[in-house]
Image (tube, rainbow, N blue to C red):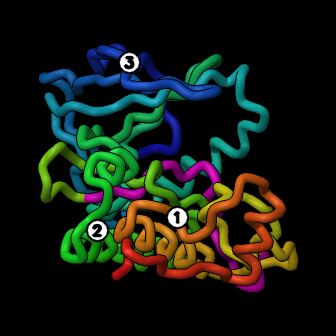
Amino acid sequence: MGFFKKSDITKLYEIGDELGSGNFAKVKKAKRKAKTADVEKEVGGKKKVVLKAGADVAIKIIDKAKVEDMQDIQREIEIMNMVDHPNVINLFEIFDEPKKMNLVLELVTGGELFDRIVAKGNYSEKDAATCMSQLCQALDYLHTKKIVHRDLKPENLLYASPADDANLKVADFGLARMLTAGDMMKTACGTPGYVAPEILKNKGYDSGAVDMWSAGVILYILLCGFPPFYEEELPALFDQILHARYDFPSPWWD
């Protein structure tokens, strides 16, 4: 597909109800019109059909006036454009308008991993293993492509459907970066309880290891229902993370 398509999105999609909204974007459910062409995407030098006519999608509508730096959005799009994996949210098309940027995304209906943890209290070891296996497959794929997510947390892991055996998908690439040779990332970013010590040290980091730390925190939460690092005040929380002070309290870990 082209990087941007400057055409009227309503010619190709029937746009429906709002699914959610954030600081600068809203997400709406939509359907690819029946008599339109299938959408193809080039991944790894090969074209493949990624969206068929008549399929349901989600459209993320970004209000350009509310975005501080459009380069951040461009970077997110660039990264998502490179990705095609069953455990990562798929970006199908982009429609660029003067005031809005429309991203046509895979529709997922199973809600956040966060909500399932809250509903279940905690996961069985078997369920946690399935969940982590899918997350690690996604991370292996992303890291092989030199993509570092940098904001992994249960709110950014979505289920494809409400079914118990639904696929887990990594979403929200707003903080993701491409790593080039010799590159050092210095940005302190992420969500406090999930952030890796090397990000807090502010000395630079150059690998996907920061994502693996967050995956470890997620695994801990899956198994007991609460986080390994928890303090009311951020300095105390960061001190706890920097010194890897966590334990396996009874009776939750017996």
Q: Which residue is mark 3?
A: 18
Q: Amino acid at mark 2?
A: Cys
Q: Amino acid at mark 1?
A: Pro
Query: Residue at left 64%, top 18%?
Result: 98
Per the rendered image, the range of residues in magenta is 168-184
Q: Which residue is mark 2?
A: 131
Q: Is residue 10 above or below residue 199?
A: above
Q: Main secondary structure of the magenta part?
A: loop
Which circle's residue, 1 or 3, is located before the other in the chain? 3
Comparing marks 1 and 2, which lies closer to the viewer? 1
Q: Quadrant of the C terminus?
A: bottom left
| Left or right of residue 17: residue 230 | right
Nearest the viewer among 178 and 191 is 191
Q: Judging from the image, what secondary structure is the residue with disc 3 in? A: strand
Query: Residue at left 57%, top 77%?
Result: 213
Q: Amino acid at mark 3?
A: Glu
Q: Which residue is mark 1?
A: 227
- x and y percentages locating residue 82 in the rendered image: 46, 60
Q: Is residue 91 above or below residue 236?
A: above
| Left or right of residue 201: residue 124 | left
* Residue 38 position by quadrant: top left
Which circle's residue, 1 or 2, is located before the other in the chain? 2
Nearest the viewer among 218 and 207 is 218
Nearest the viewer among 223 and 68 is 223
Query: Residue at left 23%, top 48%?
Result: 160
Q: Is residue 164 above or below residue 224?
A: above
Comparing marks 1 and 3, which lies closer to the viewer? 1
Magenta residue check for 239: no
How busy is the neighbourhood of tag 3: few (under 14 within 10 Å), some, or many (20 plus)? some
Q: Gap in Å between the C-alphas at discs 3 and 2?
A: 28 Å
